[in-house]
């Protein structure tokens, strides 16, 4: 996924990254057709909280597999249907 200025694996995402994504999506999706991204912005905020709970400097890779999968789906990292094709 592309975050900030580079491509990274989902497992490398930190709480700071998640908060940044949440803020960007919230700003872009507050009205009109982009309001559909509000749920994704909320998921980024929740991921940031989860990572902060795990500990400072934690990444998505530190989360258990079920939690990683749940966030991947909510954040559209894993598209609906589970395939990029």
Image (cartoon, rainbow, N blue to C red):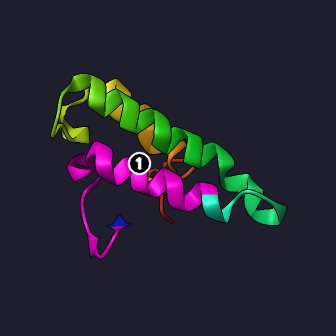
Q: Is residue 25 magenta?
A: yes
What is the chief secondary structure element of the magenta stretch? helix
Residue at left 35%, top 25%?
Answer: 66
The N terminus sits in image quarter: bottom left
Quadrant hosting residue 32: bottom right
Image coords of residue 84 (percent x, y): 48, 62
Residue at left 57%, top 48%?
Answer: 41
Image coords of residue 9 (percent x, y): 24, 58
The one of 70 and 85 positioned closer to us in this rendering: 70
Q: Is residue 10 magenta?
A: yes
Residue at left 64%, top 43%?
Answer: 39
How many labels, in total?
1
Q: Does residue 52 appear left or right of residue 28 in this picture? A: left
Outermost residue toward the bottom? Answer: 5
Helix, strand or loop for disc 1: helix
Crowding around mark 1 (Cα neighbors within 10 Å: few <14, some 14 to 19, many 20+) is: some
The one of 56 and 65 positioned closer to us in this rendering: 56
Image: magenta residue range: 3-26
Image coords of residue 8 (percent x, y): 24, 63
Residue at left 76%, top 56%?
Answer: 35
Image coords of residue 34 (percent x, y): 74, 63
Please tell me whether residue 43 is drawn above or below residue 17 in the rendered image.
Answer: above
Q: Does residue 28 appear left or right of residue 51 in this picture? A: right
Q: Does residue 73 appear left or right of residue 28 in this picture? A: left
Residue matched to label 1: 19
Please tell me whether residue 75 is drawn above or below residue 47 in the rendered image.
Answer: below
Quadrant hosting residue 50: top left
The one of 31 and 71 positioned closer to us in this rendering: 31
């Amino acid at each position: 996924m592309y975050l900030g200025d580079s491509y990274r694996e989902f497992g490398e995402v930190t709480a700071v990254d998640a908060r940044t994504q949440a803020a960007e999506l919230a700003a872009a999706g507050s009205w009109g057709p982009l309001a559909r991204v509000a749920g994704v912005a909320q998921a980024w905020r929740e991921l940031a909280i989860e990572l902060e709970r795990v500990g400072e400097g934690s990444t998505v890779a530190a989360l258990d597999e079920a939690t990683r999968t749940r966030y991947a789906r909510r954040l559209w990292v894993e598209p609906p249907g589970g395939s990029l094709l």
